[in-house]
Image (cartoon, grey):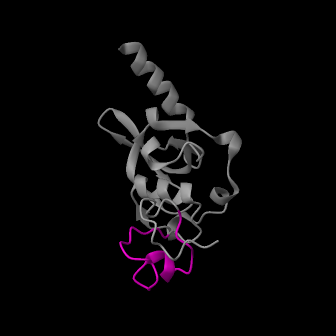
Amino acid sequence: VKLHHVYLNNLTEKFDVNDCVGVQIHTVDRTNTDAKLLPCLIPEKNRKNDDLVFKLVCQYAKLQNAFSVENLVDLKSAYPQELKQLNVDELKGISFIEACKLYVSGAVSGSTCDCKSKCTTEHCPCKKANVSCSTKCHSKRGACQNMGD
């Protein structure tokens, strides 16, 4: 147990503010051909009890969840251009699951929906943002009229 704690402390020191890291995307939030990691930046490190936790931002928003070092994968060598150009102060907060859905759908607007209709009106967040619905919006419903080409 002590060796594991030492290992985690060493791993924690490896990550600094503004580093690029990845967080595992659960299999229920992606298909087997989608990305397995959500690329993120570390805007802050905080101490919580005896552990360090990391606040993260992805290209779409600030993640509301805090992550421990066990959840992080080093992506410093594969720093995506979208993250290099982020203005963190302008980003809103969303949950990790929402961020994963946006990332695997390749969302350009940050909009996804779970409409029960055909997505033909402005009630649909995707239609309102003038983007096509993706398969991650409501993949089980075949009646969507906003799927694009």
Q: Is residue 129 visible?
A: yes
Q: Is residue 17 above or below residue 49?
A: below
Query: What residue do we see at 55% from left, 42% from top?
Result: 32
Q: Is residue 144 above or below residue 45?
A: below
Q: Is residue 26 visible?
A: no
Point out residue 90 in the picture as x, y percentages from the top left corner: 51, 70
Query: What residue do we see at 49% from left, 67% from top?
Result: 91
Magenta region's main secondary structure? loop
In the image, 108 versus 84, the foreground residue is 108
- In the displayed structure image, the side of residue 84 where residue 59 appears, left or right: left
- In the displayed structure image, the side of residue 103 where residue 83 appears, left or right: right
Point out residue 22 in the picture as x, y percentages from the top left corner: 55, 43
User: What is the tally of numbered marks visible in this picture?
Assistant: 0
Furthest residue in direction front, as rendered: 142
Point out residue 26 in the picture as x, y percentages from the top left corner: 45, 42
Residue 125 within the magenta-colored segment of the rendering:
yes
Quadrant in the picture for residue 98: bottom left
Q: Which residues are magenta?
A: 111-134
In the image, 13 versus 134, the foreground residue is 134
Location of the C terminus (image quadrant):
bottom right
Furthest residue in direction left, as rendered: 49
Residue 5 within the magenta-colored segment of the rendering:
no
Location of the N terminus (image quadrant):
top left
Point out residue 42 in the picture as x, y percentages from the top left corner: 52, 49
In the image, 18 versus 109, the foreground residue is 109
Q: Is residue 88 above or below residue 125?
A: above
Furthest residue in direction bottom, as rendered: 122
